[in-house]
């Protein structure tokens, strides 16, 4: 699907339910990227009884984590994935460009939303073809109802890895259901119908760009046909 989500990001957010904006300068991107990679390596070290060679590339994580004795499920527990960033990282994340855009498309005053009992800043690690990402849903169907989300790629910038979105889905009511045995957050609704691949848009992104998306837009974190493990960070504002 060809879609212009950059030339007029405010219009894209209104029409499609999301936009891609260049929100981070080179220094800010480097601070965020270096921290995220170091953060996940530290999580790995806490969840294996073996020493993992630092030369092992995180994008190849899906190929080596099992041989290295990494307890993958434990690594992805919320207590390891959310923090309240210290000053340098927080300043990089909350760039002037980002805050201005959030305020331009919503009533938000720039107030950050904390995951209940956790911090406001998190990471996701999605292995290809392993169903690590949740099925199509929207934030309004869970405990993060009403938030504006920021999605920042760290590893995986192509359309094979980035967030899967359904343009315009925030303007339509959708039938949802509660899965019986979800490995994801209990009590969160998911889209009931099947999604046609032609409905899905995944932007190819550049360093410094983020996706900003509406609380009602349908999206999925899953990665199907990539050859790398995707790492991204995320945070949210109260609308």
Image: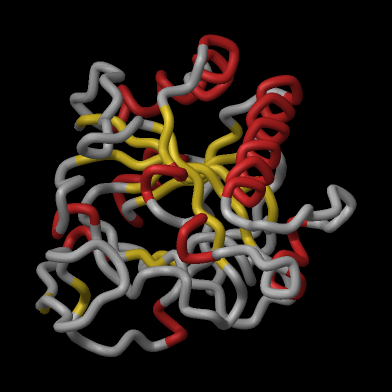
Give the residue at the far right of this rendering: 55
Q: Position of residue 108 (x, y in %)?
A: 23, 24
Q: From what the image shows, is residue 101 above or below residue 206? A: above
The picture quadrant where one finds residue 178 is: bottom left
In the rendered image, residue 199, in percent from the top left (x then y), is placed at 40, 79
At 84% across and 48% down in the image, what residue appears?
A: 54
Image coordinates of residue 91 in percent, x first then y, are 53, 13
Residue nearer the viewer, 17 or 182:
182
Residue at 72%, 33% in the rendered image: 34
At 55% across and 43% down in the image, what residue appears? 152
Residue lying furthest front in this view?
49
Q: What colour scheme does the image use?
A: secondary structure
Which quarter of the rendering shows the C terminus?
top left
Q: Nearer the viewer, residue 104 or 125?
A: 125
Instruction: Please state the total of marks drawn on the protein image.
Output: 0
| Quadrant of res 189 | bottom left
């Amino acid at each position: 699907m060809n879609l212009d989500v950059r030339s007029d990001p405010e219009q894209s957010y209104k029409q499609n339910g999301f936009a891609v904006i260049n929100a981070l300068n080179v220094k800010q991107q480097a601070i965020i990227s270096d921290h995220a990679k170091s953060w996940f390596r530290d999580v790995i070290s806490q969840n294996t009884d073996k020493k993992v060679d630092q030369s092992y590339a995180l994008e190849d994580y899906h190929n080596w984590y099992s041989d290295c004795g990494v307890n993958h499920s434990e690594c992805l527990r919320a207590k390891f994935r959310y923090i309240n960033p210290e000053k340098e990282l927080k300043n990089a994340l909350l760039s002037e460009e980002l805050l201005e855009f959030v305020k331009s498309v919503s009533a938000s005053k720039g107030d950050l939303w904390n995951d209940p009992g956790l911090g406001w800043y998190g990471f996701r690690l999605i292995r290809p073809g392993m169903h690590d990402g949740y099925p199509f849903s929207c934030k309004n169907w869970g405990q993060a109802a009403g938030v504006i989300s920021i999605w920042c790629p760290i590893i995986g910038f192509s359309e094979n890895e980035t967030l899967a979105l359904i343009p315009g889905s925030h303007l339509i009511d959708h039938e949802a259901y509660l899965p019986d045995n979800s490995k994801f957050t209990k009590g969160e609704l998911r889209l009931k119908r099947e999604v046609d691949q032609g409905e899905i848009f995944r932007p190819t992104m550049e360093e410094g760009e983020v996706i900003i998306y509406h609380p009602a837009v349908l999206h999925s974190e899953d990665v199907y046909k990539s050859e790398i493990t995707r790492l991204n960070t995320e945070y949210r504002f109260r609308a």
